[in-house]
Image (tube, rainbow, N blue to C red):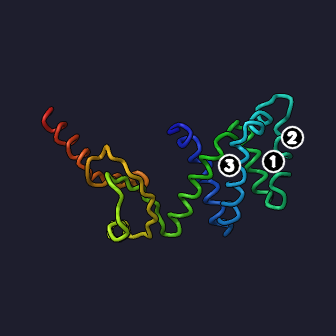
């Protein structure tokens, strides 16, 4: 998974820069979402990987699927992906693009793991604190993980804030070993 994201990142960054420069963030978001769905289909992957079909034929098929959304830039993007055999990376590219788009809009998604279900007021306080800390609008995805024992673990992109009992115990064990 991490390898796919590493390989997909330059494509997502290039598309994001192009979309931002041309003011077509929403259109590219829709196109990448559609292409990501196609790339998750086993039959589509078989067609793209099949040596009986040329890259031009695969590109024509994909642009037909997109219909009017297939601008010249989209066609070029598809051609590059097919030439470099990166079609299967489209879900990761689309996900990274959405992350860049949200960051550009001053929004961020936070994955919040808690040992127990949070009340609405607790979640509100936590997201307000994150909003103040990050200076961005925060959308929270909350999951319950009883293995944390207590507390909370927040992941926002590369930033991890581990305020769980399990995390504190792991820190203590590490400090005792050294």
Above or below, 110 relative to 7: below
Q: Secondary structure at mark 3?
A: helix
Q: CA distance from mark 2 to mark 1?
A: 9 Å
Q: Residue at x 36, y 48 (%)?
A: 145
Q: How many circles with numbers are drawn on the protein?
A: 3
Q: Are marks 2 and 3 in contact (CB under 8 Å)?
A: no
**x and y, in percent, of residue 126 in the image:** 33, 66
Numbered mark located on residue 57 in the image? 2
Q: Are marks 2 and 1 in contact (CB under 8 Å)?
A: no
Above or below, 148 relative to 16: above
The C terminus - image quarter = top left
Whichever of callouts 1 and 3 sits on the residue coming sooner in the sequence is 3
In-front residue for pair 56/99: 99
Q: Residues within 10 Å of mark 2 (few under 14, many from 20)?
A: few
In-front residue for pair 30/142: 142
Q: In the picture provided, is 2 more to the left or to the right than 123? A: right
Q: CA distance from mark 1 to mark 3?
A: 11 Å
Q: In the picture provided, is 25 more to the left or to the right than 113? A: right
Q: Residues within 10 Å of mark 1 (few under 14, many from 20)?
A: many
Whichever of callouts 2 and 3 sits on the residue coming sooner in the sequence is 3
Q: Residues within 10 Å of mark 3 (few under 14, many from 20)?
A: many
Q: Secondary structure at mark 2?
A: helix
| Residue denoted by label 3 | 36
Q: In the picture provided, is 6 more to the left or to the right than 117? A: right
**x and y, in percent, of residue 54 in the image:** 85, 35
Whichever of callouts 2 and 1 sits on the residue coming sooner in the sequence is 2
Q: Secondary structure at mark 1?
A: helix
Q: Residue at x 80, y 57 (%)?
A: 70
| Residue denoted by label 1 | 62
Numbered mark located on residue 27 in the image? none
**x and y, in percent, of residue 9 in the image:** 56, 47
Q: Residue at x 53, y 64 (%)?
A: 102
């Amino acid at each position: 998974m991490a390898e796919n994201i590493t390989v997909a990142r330059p494509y997502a960054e290039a598309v994001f820069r192009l979309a931002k420069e041309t003011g077509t963030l929403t259109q590219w978001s829709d196109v990448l979402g559609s292409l990501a769905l196609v790339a998750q289909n086993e039959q589509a992957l078989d067609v793209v990987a099949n040596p009986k079909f040329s890259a031009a034929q695969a590109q024509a098929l994909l642009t037909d699927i997109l219909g009017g959304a297939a601008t010249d830039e989209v066609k070029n993007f598809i051609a590059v992906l097919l030439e470099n055999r990166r079609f299967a990376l489209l879900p990761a590219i689309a996900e990274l693009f959405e992350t860049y788009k949200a960051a550009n809009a001053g929004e961020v998604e936070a994955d919040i793991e808690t040992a127990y279900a949070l009340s609405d007021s607790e979640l509100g306080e936590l997201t307000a604190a994150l909003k103040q800390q990050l200076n961005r609008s925060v959308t929270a995805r909350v999951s319950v993980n009883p293995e944390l024992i207590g507390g909370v673990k927040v992941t926002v992109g590369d930033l991890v804030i581990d305020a769980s009992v399990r995390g504190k115990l792991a820190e203590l064990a590490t400090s005792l070993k050294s």
